[in-house]
Image (cartoon, rainbow, N blue to C red):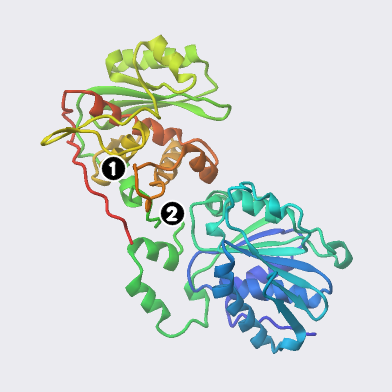
Amino acid sequence: MQLQFNTFGNEKQKDVCRLWQDNDVTDIVYGGSKGSGKSYLGCSLIFGDAFTYPETHYFIARDSLTNIRKFTIPSIHEVFEHWGIGQQYYDYNGQDNYYTCYNKSRVYLLDAKYLPRDPLYARFGSMQMTRGWIEEAGEFKEAAKNNLSASIGRWKNDVYGLTPKLLQTCNPAKNYLYKQYYRKAKDRELEAWKRFVQALPQDNKRLPAGYLENLHRTLSVNEKQRLLFGNWEYDDDPSALIDYDKILDLWQNEHIGGGRKFITCDVARYGRDTTKICVWDGWRVIAYRTIKGASVPEVAAAVRVMMTEYSVPASQVVVDDDGVGGGVTDTVGCKGFVNNARPMEERTPDGKQTPNYNNLKSQCYFRLADRINQAGIYILPNVMSEKEVEDTVEELEQVKQRDMDAEGKKAVISKEDVKELIGRSPDNSDVLMMREYFELNSPVVSTARAYRPQVRQRRL
């Protein structure tokens, strides 16, 4: 059987085809927008191999079988039609969800949704596959990707001299793809066996007339940035509490005046976590320090040095009181911030009320999100390193509402979930969030820009 994959002038698809034949490359990410030919490419590469090498095994994984049936299978049969492959050359088992080719090769359609009984996706660990494709990888957790990747290269690769290959197609997403592929490729730090190929709708020469114009008319601003322009820095997750542009404005908001001085400190609890100490002049961040691997006495001493340098009394210092942070609080004699404490009363025009948050941390993060969206914080440009600025932006993008469609108390996603997404503890955003404690805990109204609670509406 002779098969020809006609890319119709899509040079980015040709690049991936060349990488598919490159024995030094085993991990390829292709994506960046809608309409860039991701599904057609994946179907062509997987079934091209399946029809070429007898008795080999492949997988196509997606977040649900429903989406595979609705969106992937039509693309598979579109490829078959272009190749002139009739039903005599394959059989589809709809009960167990796999294709068997005439040469006894198989392509398995995998449901990769999260299962509470299998949080690490161990169900994929025993599979023996030749190669595989993850479609819409932006919807995947890293553990799912890792276990799927571990299954390839285990079935007749040695017989045909086939290098294990994992193809991931996606739209821009702020999961592991952003940090491990997009950012590393941008910084020229991508590992030698990986490749990232950015694709845009303009690369696909077979788009229907009016497709791009319709995207311009129907997509929101954030969606256009991600799905039309391939901008990986934007996140249109409706649960995100802070607008991306407003995060970038933090270093431009020179209109924010000074006021009372405060210090917030988030103390490292585990090996790679870092201690962050932030000095505030009203709602201006005027000093910032990162400490790695310091003991409790060393952190306490560093806080005291900054208290003296900036004339901040202990009553205007708050330290994360969870874990070892309690030792710093006791040593300094300052206030302690307990993340899981009950939410505090908020002052309102008609008195005081206790808002419907699940804990103090969520309350302060919701308030911080609204304040940032109102351009109410200024971080002096010279107080953070370039790396600290990048990390702060990334962490604030992960301030998201948990279970936003559920009834009950409002909460932000857990630190553990954020760690999984960005690969580290969100210490920079936590130390900023803690500043809201003084707005809740002090009878004195700050001279900084007044906080005006806003009713957040779900973005559709």
Give the answer, above or below, for where 87 lies relative to 365: below
Q: Can residue 14 be seen in this snapshot?
A: no
Viewer can see residue 334: yes
Q: Element type at marker 1?
A: helix
Which is closer to the viewer, label 2 or label 1? 1
Location of residue 78 by image quarter: bottom right
What's the residue at 81%, 58% (across, down)?
154
Side of 213 where 325 appears, left or right: right
The picture places residue 168, in percent across and down from the top left corner, at 61, 62
Q: Furthest residue to the right?
A: 159
**Earlier along the polypeptide chain: callout 2 or callout 1?**
2
The residue positioned 61% from the left and 76% from the top of the image is: 73
| In contact (CB < 8 Å): disc 2 and disc 1 | no
Label 2 secondary element: loop
Location of residue 92 by image quarter: bottom right
Q: Quadrant of residue 328?
A: top left
Q: Residue 147: give x, y in percent of width and height.
A: 69, 52
Neighbor class of circle 2 (other Cα within 10 Å; few <14, some 14-19, many 20+) is some
Q: Which residue is mark 1?
A: 372
Q: Is residue 385 left or right of residue 7?
A: left
> Residue 274 placed where, x, y %?
50, 28
Left or right: residue 357 versus residue 121 is left
The one of 256 and 131 positioned closer to us in this rendering: 131
Q: Is residue 147 left or right of residue 32?
A: right
Residue type (three-letter) at the residue carrying disc 2:
Glu
Report x, y in % for residue 169. 58, 64
Q: Which residue is mark 2?
A: 233
